[in-house]
Amino acid sequence: MTWSSQVTGWSQRMVASELPAWIPDDDQDTVQNSSEEAAQGAEAGTGKSVSASRLEEEGDVAADYLEELLDIADIDGDIDIEVRNGRTYISIVAEEEAAGLDSLVGRDGEVLEALQELTRLAVLSATENRSRLVLDINGYRAERAGDLQKIAEDAVAAVKDSGEAVALAPMSAYERKIVHDAVADLGLVSESEGEGADRHIVVSAD
């Protein structure tokens, strides 16, 4: 079994329908527009904004955890930490193309999502605070964001042509947030439906 397969296996119990209450989901049961979701997400379930010092602390904890994992897997990578908009963003990049890092992304980002959840758990264990950190590896999320924008545009076009709602394929909470924002910018509405790994977005005219 490869190391990336082990990571995916560790996280199989972490699908959204089985997550304990302290594992945050960026996407709420029903989202009418991006501003509503952003307001809910910014509070992170606590009713308070997250302080910069706390975000910096979770970034340091996450970086230490990921560095140890990279050492165990014998994979080279530089870890960058950025705090913006009330959230911690962690990026793992390599100066030269590294197949090892690509294996930590996995098919359709499956391993990346698993690593993100494990990193959030590491932060929770060390700080006793929830984490909504976002992990990216080799720019996968940035590239995927372009794909999600196109998916949103195609869905909006289909709704306008047919007048009927369009259901998209299941996505992670982070990706649903990107699509919700894109759909809102294009003048239509979207909401999330389904549970766990089947949670998906439905785009409609109203």
Image (spheres, grey):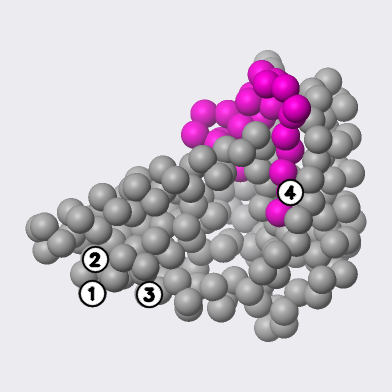
Picture quadrant of residue 183: bottom left
Label 2 and label 3: CA atoms lie apart by 10 Å
Which residues make up the magenta segment? 89-114
- Left/right of residue 24 with respect to residue 16 in the rendered view: right
Amino acid tagged 1: Asp
Asked whether the beta carbons under mark 2 and mark 1 sit within 8 Å of each other, the answer is: yes
Label 2 and label 4: CA atoms lie apart by 34 Å
Instruction: Give me the residue at 41% from left, 57% from top.
Output: 179
The disc, 3 or 4, on the residue closer to the chain's N-terminal end is 3
The residue pinned by badge 4 equals 90
Instruction: Give me the residue at 63% from left, 25% from top.
Output: 102
Of residues 130 and 33, which is closer to you in this image?
33
The residue pinned by badge 1 equals 206
The residue pinned by badge 3 equals 32
Q: Mark 4: which secondary structure?
A: strand
Label 3 and label 4: CA atoms lie apart by 29 Å
Asked whether the beta carbons under mark 1 and mark 3 sit within 8 Å of each other, the answer is: no
In the rendered structure, find residue 204 and report the number of the disc placed on it.
2
The disc, 1 or 3, on the residue closer to the chain's N-terminal end is 3
Q: Where is residue 122 in the image (x, y as percent from the top left)?
A: 82, 50
Label 1 and label 3: CA atoms lie apart by 9 Å
